[in-house]
Amino acid sequence: MSILNVENLSHGFGDRAIFQDVSFRLLKGEHIGLIGANGEGKSTFMNIITGKLMPDEGKVEWSKNVVVGYLDQHTVLQEGQTIRDVLASAFAPLFDLETRMNEICSLLETATDRQMEEYMEELGTIQDLLTAHDFYMIDSKVEEVGNALGLTEIGLDKEVTQLSGGQRTKVLLGKLLLSKPDILLLDEPTNYLDVNHIEWLKRYLIDYENAFILISHDIPFLNEVVNLIYHMDHRELNRYVGNYDKFMEVYEMKQSQLEAAYNKQQKEIAELKDFVARNKARVATRNMAMSRQKKLDKMDIIELSAERPKPEFHFKTARTPGRYIFQTRDLVIGYDEPLSSPLTLEMERGSKIVLSGANGIGKSTLLKSILGLIPSLNGNVTLGDYLEIGYFEQELSELPNTTCIEEIWNEFPGYTQYEVRSALAKCGLTTKHIESKVKVLSGGEQAKVRLCKILNRESNLLVLDEPTNHLDVDAKQALCEALTEYKGSILMVCHEPDFYEPFATAVWDCSKWTTRL
């Protein structure tokens, strides 16, 4: 049975087309991976099918009485709410049903026989719905999901505005799972999640009976949980049966077949054009030349899609710093309360260190404390001599209202327009993206703009906070290679062992010194 039908969908922003005559059908029980490079419109597609965005053309039809649960990478939580409040809000429609049930009960006193019959039928339906969706077990369900996602350790009565990016994602995911939707729509759910909870989510999705659509650039995760791939590429949406590895196998074969057919046709076209040019003026061969020309005119020309620019990351290295990058003595990090025990750490020149551990235990706070961006609660940090630091922040509090060109130009006023455009293109951005405002770009494209600033300034220490979030497969691969080649030192927060293992010299487990566990 079809849950969702999308017909002849077209959409764009300004003169940049995102979709062109796209059709899509979702069947019950399908586990779909929605993939494509940054900026191809995956999140836009989600916003259209959930009704957050109206398409320029086309039709979106959901089956009746389908409950849709959407985990959006940009959802904002309200100030003043606790974790428990947000999780319990998953049952808001059920509380509305309860209110309606109470209304019906009060109406029964004055109802006619016919009305009585209708009211009793409606009461029965509401009662069944409340039971089916665990209305009478809300508190225990909230506790259960809170435990599974590690939220109980944080404290269910903690305000959501005090949470880290990863903790907020867990809260939203918990709310989504509690609502028991008929279809799950997940936009980058593994971003900000630590290894243990990614594993838990993986098991949950493998066993999930209903349909889901998953946007992710985490290939090992995709491979294990999906059975269908929809690939967004050059305004098209194509369906492939199987996981990501199967898709790549079929896709590469199709591309090589298309390329072979294109080359064969181009050779034929060249021969026909040559024959026409040589023979159209001669009376004896004019008819043959005209026949060839007609064949040329009727020919369906094979076109190869213009290849999206692949990112090329190369970090510029500054002068060699002193032996020690930083040293801490009895450092206690935190805001209102300590997040760590006293830390005495040191990092030597040439080290490439990854900070690992669960979300919310203070990894980002440690980076900021070392850099002096926030004050520590106790102890001190000594930075080494001659440091030139490139810092990539996990999330920006506010997005700039400038174009990509202006953003880089403000940072490097001495650059010519050609140099600015070239620098952004090397990061994998097309002309359309380069001329767009930063705030209308996808999360991955915004990350590339921020990386562009670091790439074009000499550094001998890179401090990177979850740099792989939102990046597509090509960009991740290019970044991994660049960090492997980098001659300076690296201090990085990352939850993807597949990404950092090629270059990391040490992994520091932050759970050993946190006060949160």
Image: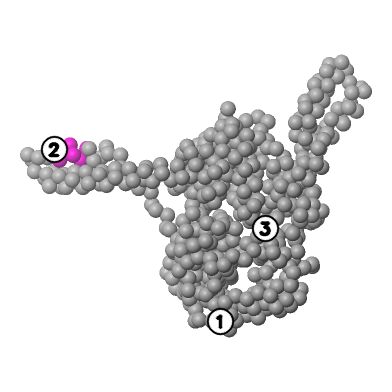
The reply to whether dot 1 and dot 3 touch (C-beta < 8 Å) is no
Which residue is identified by label 1?
A: 323
Which residue is identified by label 2?
A: 288
Of residues 106 and 285, which is closer to you in this image? 106
- Report the magenta residues as a range: 287-294
Q: Amino acid at mark 2?
A: Met
The reply to whether dot 3 and dot 2 touch (C-beta < 8 Å) is no
Q: Which mark is residue 358?
A: 3
Is residue 419 shown above or below 5?
below
3D distance between C-alphas at marks 1 and 3: 31 Å
Residue lying farthest right?
Answer: 109
Q: Amino acid at mark 3?
A: Ala
Q: Position of residue 206 (x, y in %)?
A: 60, 40
Q: Which SS class for mark 2?
A: helix
Report the side of 120 relative to 47 (left or right). Answer: right
Q: Which SS class for mark 1?
A: loop
Of residues 301 and 335, which is closer to you in this image? 335
- The disc, 2 or 1, on the residue closer to the chain's N-terminal end is 2
Is residue 96 shown above or below 468?
above
